[in-house]
Amino acid sequence: MAQEDPNENGRKPQKEAAGRSRPGRLARNRVCQLCKGEFLFCWTCRCGFAMCQACMNENFWTLSCNGIQWQCPECGDLNGYGNQ
Ligand SMILES: [Zn+2]
Ligand SMILES: [Zn+2]
């Protein structure tokens, strides 16, 4: 039986951060480590490696042995396509 605690029900001026403070910058783009270009989207590995879509397309069959996963050239980890 939960009884309402009048003390807990008092009006507390709890301000929820209305709208995150924007530093005035766009989110940092990722830098493709192959072509060194900046992109909004990059394929990334947990080791920090990033590769843009164009480079991925170019190297798809070099990096992928089965078309389902691509192998990070940095650490050799397998990363799934479309699963990030
Ligand atoms: Zn690239
Ligand atoms: Zn990696």
Image: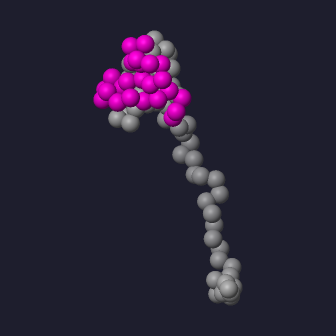
**Above or below: residue 12 compared with residue 72:** below
How many discs mark residues in the rendered view?
0
80 inside magenta stretch? yes
Residue at 48 percent across and 23 percent down: it is: 68
List x then y, in percent, for residue 71. Answer: 37, 24
List x then y, in percent, for residue 75. Answer: 30, 29
The quarter of the displayed image where residue 32 is located: top left
In the picture, the quarter occupied by the N terminus is bottom right
How is colour applied across the structure in the image? one colour
List x then y, in percent, for residue 36. Answer: 40, 20
**Above or below: residue 66 compared with residue 7:** above
**Above or below: residue 26 compared with residue 67:** below
Is residue 59 among the parts visible in the rendering?
no
List x then y, in percent, for residue 26. Answer: 55, 37
Report whether 47 appears left or right of 80: left
37 inside magenta stretch? no
Residue furthest to the left in view is: 75
Residue at 31 percent across and 27 percent down: it is: 76
Residue at 45 percent across and 11 percent down: it is: 58
Residue furthest to the front in view is: 66
**Above or below: residue 16 compared with residue 79:** below
Report whether 16 appears left or right of 63: right
> Looking at the magenta stretch, what is its main secondary structure?
loop
Is residue 72 among the parts visible in the rendering?
yes
Report whether 78 appears left or right of 7: left
Residue range corresponding to the magenta coloring = 61-84
Report whether 81 appears left or right of 63: right
Residue at 63 percent across and 67 percent down: it is: 15
